[in-house]
Image (tube, rainbow, N blue to C red):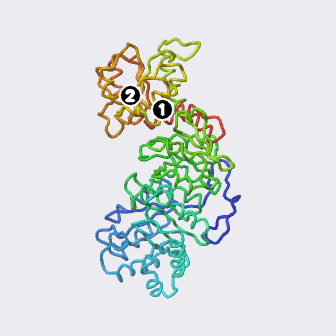
């Protein structure tokens, strides 16, 4: 049972049929501009984009004339207004007289603002000056912002109690994420809150708090009008909230999935899975999860609704170590790329990278007339894998399984040797690979991160070496056409994009996450639009 605004909302009340909303969490667009006219333009844009209300940040106005400006802003705004006049001491821009600031907030109430934000530090003073006189319609949000960290559950609980003791209509607690697990404490408080509450964890590691506030019953979340122009770190855009994360469809029963990595900002996975989930009416969300410690993350988010993860660099081996059960091929590889939480809570690990990559390479060879009708076109081929990390292991084992002769090339020879001995192959350093060509028509797979955004001018192998290969595959998919692939094309090799591996493994993961057949064409089209 989620309590929002003292009206008990049973989960059943929030289950909406045919794509309507599942939660009452509002989207609030911060409006920060130097003039009233610019602010009004932004409020109209916020409405067009689908925001429910706007936060007017008076502290950004250059020449603020309280009565005149508030009259215009409140009366002409096309959406409900939340008036905030944030002082420097609470992370805002206002650096003037405190009495004048509070007078402006009282004026905003008189002139018909829907909400005003008053900082906890001055809330008692503020309530004393209004002496219980406030228009019926206006709701006072009492806020606390912590720009250092996220306190313990007990400390946040005490903070909420202090905010409530002021007489607040709505509680706002914004903290800062040092680790992704910090959001869990805010979720716990949100779920049990008997009053409307805004709970936000700022920064990239707190990103999930902004999306999942709809699942855990937050009163509102903030969405920027323009991507990147944010009022606090980690804020998503209104467009991403609605179109990428299907914010209106999230509710108490939504199943949480995501991609676990570090860094994670570049990941295209949310762009694939969220539209795919929506297209088959699956009540799930897929988030970028910037995780520092995998075991901590899994332990903290152990609830049955956190159900499935993709693993990427550098966490594939850490994920493997946290599994209760492991698929046999993943066990051989020693790394997973997909984890599913079973109904009994057990974590099952799979490696879908090798399925995706090997299928993509085989398709490339077959499309160019390679034989192997009876078996794999990789059978008998000399298959050079660059990199011996999680993806390198996946490709080496995949190649072995298809009957290829595997050569592992790595920066450090020892790591290459260790993997090569497991797949009955040869080992070589990346430096020696440049002059390695025992035969023509070899196959090359790059699993290192050399050439990935932002260092797109780098390549893991000099162009002159590429003429000895009939096919070159690059696991990197940002950018799609890496320097390695461009130079391989110029050298006459068949090239296979990392996006193909990505698509093939996305089909497999989608089916594991949802239990439904993957909408393959939709996933292909979505990826084409986002690369």
Callout 2: few (<14), some (14-19), or many (20+) C-alpha neighbours within 10 Å? many
Q: Quadrant of the N terminus?
A: bottom right
Q: Is residue 440 above or below residue 92?
A: above
Res 522 visible: no
Q: Position of residue 289 (x, y in %)?
A: 49, 50
Q: In this view, does 364 lie above or below 85?
A: above
The quarter of the displayed image where residue 466 is located: top left
Identify the residue position indicated by label 2 in the image. 409
Q: Residues within 10 Å of mark 1 (few under 14, many from 20)?
A: many
Q: How many labels were placed on the picture? A: 2
Task: Give me the C-alpha separation between circle 2 and circle 1.
Answer: 11 Å
Residue at 43 percent of width and 76 percent of height: 119
Q: What element carries label 1?
A: helix
Of residues 213 and 423, which is closer to you in this image? Answer: 423
- In the depicted view, which residue is nearer to us: 411 or 104? 411
Q: What element carries label 2?
A: strand
- Report the residue at 44% width, 56% height from top: 205
- Mark with earlier residue (2, 1): 1
Residue bearing the label numbered 1: 393
In the image: residue 71, left or right of residue 135 = left
Residue 403 in view here = yes
Q: Quadrant of residue 467?
A: top left
């Amino acid at each position: 049972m989620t309590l929002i605004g003292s009206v008990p909302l049973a989960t059943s009340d929030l289950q909406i049929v045919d794509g309507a909303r599942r939660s009452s969490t509002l989207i609030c667009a911060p409006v920060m501009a130097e003039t009233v006219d610019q602010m009004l333009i932004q409020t109209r844009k916020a409405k067009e984009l689908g925001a429910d209300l706007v936060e007017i940040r008076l502290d950004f106005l250059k020449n603020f004339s309280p009565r005149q400006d508030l009259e215009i802003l409140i009366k002409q705004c096309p959406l409900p207004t939340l008036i905030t006049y944030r002082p420097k001491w609470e992370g805002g821009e206002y650096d003037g007289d405190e009495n004048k600031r509070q007078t402006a907030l009282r004026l905003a109430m008189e002139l018909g603002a829907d909400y005003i934000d008053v900082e906890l530090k001055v809330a008692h003073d503020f309530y004393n000056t209004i002496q219980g006189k406030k228009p019926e319609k206006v709701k006072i949000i009492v806020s606390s912002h912590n720009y250092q960290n996220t306190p313990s559950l007990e400390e946040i609980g005490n903070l909420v109690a202090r905010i409530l003791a002021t007489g607040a209509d709505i509680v706002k607690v914004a903290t800062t994420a040092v680790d992704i697990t910090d959001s869990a404490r805010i979720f716990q408080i949100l779920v049990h809150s008997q009053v409307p509450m805004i709970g936000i964890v700022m920064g990239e590691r707190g990103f999930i708090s902004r999306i999942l506030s709809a699942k855990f019953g937050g009163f509102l979340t903030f969405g920027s009008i323009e991507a990147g122009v944010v009022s606090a770190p980690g804020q998503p855009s209104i467009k991403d909230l609605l179109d990428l994360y299907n914010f209106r469809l999230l509710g108490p029963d939504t199943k949480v999935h995501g991609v676990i990595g570090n860094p994670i900002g570049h990941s295209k996975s949310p762009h694939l899975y969220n539209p795919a989930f929506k297209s088959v009416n699956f009540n799930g969300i897929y988030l970028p999860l910037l995780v520092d410690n995998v075991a901590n993350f899994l332990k903290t988010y152990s609830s049955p609704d956190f159900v499935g993860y993709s693993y990427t660099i550098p966490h594939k081996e850490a994920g493997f170590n946290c599994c209760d059960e492991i698929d046999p091929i993943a066990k051989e590889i020693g790394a997973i790329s997909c984890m599913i939480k079973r109904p009994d809570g057990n974590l099952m690990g799979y490696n879908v990278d090798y399925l995706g990559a090997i299928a993509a390479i085989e398709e490339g060879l077959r499309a160019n007339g390679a034989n192997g009708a009876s078996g794999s076109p990789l059978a008998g081929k000399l298959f050079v894998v660059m990199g011996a990390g999680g993806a390198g292991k996946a490709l080496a084992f995949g190649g072995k399984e298809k009957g290829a002769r595997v050569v592992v090339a790595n920066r450090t020879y020892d790591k290459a040797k260790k993997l090569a001995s497991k797949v009955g192959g040869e080992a070589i350093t990346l430096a020696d690979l440049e002059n390695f060509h025992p035969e023509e028509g070899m196959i090359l797979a790059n699993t290192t991160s050399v050439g990935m955004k932002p260092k797109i001018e780098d390549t893991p192998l000099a162009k002159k070496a590429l003429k000895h290969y009939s096919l070159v595959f690059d696991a990197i998919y940002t950018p799609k056409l890496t320097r390695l692939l461009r130079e391989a094309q110029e050298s006459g090799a068949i090239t296979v994009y990392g996006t193909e591996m990505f698509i093939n493994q996305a089909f497999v993961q989608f089916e594991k996450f949802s239990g439904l057949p993957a909408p393959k064409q939709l996933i292909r089209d979505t990826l084409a639009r986002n690369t």
